[in-house]
Amino acid sequence: MSVTLHTTHGDLKVEIFCEAVPKTAENFLALCASGAYNETPFHRLMPSFMVQGGDISLSAANKASSSSPLPFDIPKGGASIYHPAPLEQEIHLPTLRHNARGILSMAGKPVKNQGGAGGAVPQDINGSQFFITFAAAPHLDGKSTVFGKVLDPGRTGEEGEPVDTLTRLEKPHVKIR
């Protein structure tokens, strides 16, 4: 399934891997459909690596209104549609990897679960935040849920100017509309 993210720098059409990562796909698509991502910034930019967005607690609409697009108050940092239950990582190696430009992946949130005799064990759960790679990032394989890809990851023109939305996302101050 594909969805288009309308950003302040242009439209970004992405394919979502619904069959491979059904819970993550359901979460992302439901957040898109509810308008939870509207007016949220890409708040973390690491040129030549990735851009991160999806913190639905930063949405202007969520800040200005007491009516959340979701049936619960949105905590700082955002949340999945399953909140307060965790959205566990859906890691599928070697099939889904951070092996190219334009990979969509969940930005995991570290939590401590209640381990057995050894005590609390750190792990990551998913919420609403995601990132898009600008290059392959194999060091993230097995750590973050890959759930989609940009359908036209783009390039730069002859003069070095961006000719596609993903390239323009490497500039600061971009929002999802």
Image (tube, rainbow, N blue to C red):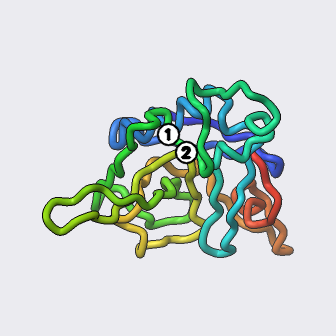
The quadrant in which residue 7 appears is top right
The residue that appears at 55% across and 45% down in the rendered structure is 128
Q: CA distance from mark 2 to mark 1?
A: 5 Å
Q: Which residue is mark 1?
A: 80
Residue nearer the viewer, 62 or 158: 62
Residue 177 visible? The answer is: no
Q: Is residue 69 above or below residue 25?
A: above
The residue that appears at 68% across and 64% down in the rendered structure is 44
Query: Residue 28: image x %, image y %?
Result: 52, 38
Q: Are marks 2 and 1 in contact (CB under 8 Å)?
A: yes
Q: Identity of the amino acid at label 2?
A: Ser
Query: Residue 69: image x %, image y %?
Result: 65, 27
Q: Tag 1 or tag 2, which sits nearer the N-term?
A: 1
State the SS at label 2.
loop
Residue nearer the viewer, 165 or 91: 91
Query: Residue 95: image x %, image y %?
Result: 31, 56
Q: Is residue 98 left or right of residue 51?
A: left
Q: Identity of the amino acid at label 1?
A: Ser
The residue that appears at 63% across and 59% down in the rendered structure is 52
Q: Is residue 23 above or below residue 146?
A: above
The quadrant in which residue 97 appears is bottom left
Q: For the C terminus, give its image quadrant.
A: top right
Q: Which residue is mark 2?
A: 128
Q: How many marks?
A: 2
How would you rate the neighbour count of disc 1 (Cα within 10 Å): few for under 14, some for 14-19, many for 20 or more?
Answer: many
Q: Is residue 103 left or right of residue 43?
A: left
State the SS at label 1.
loop
Residue 160 visible? The answer is: yes
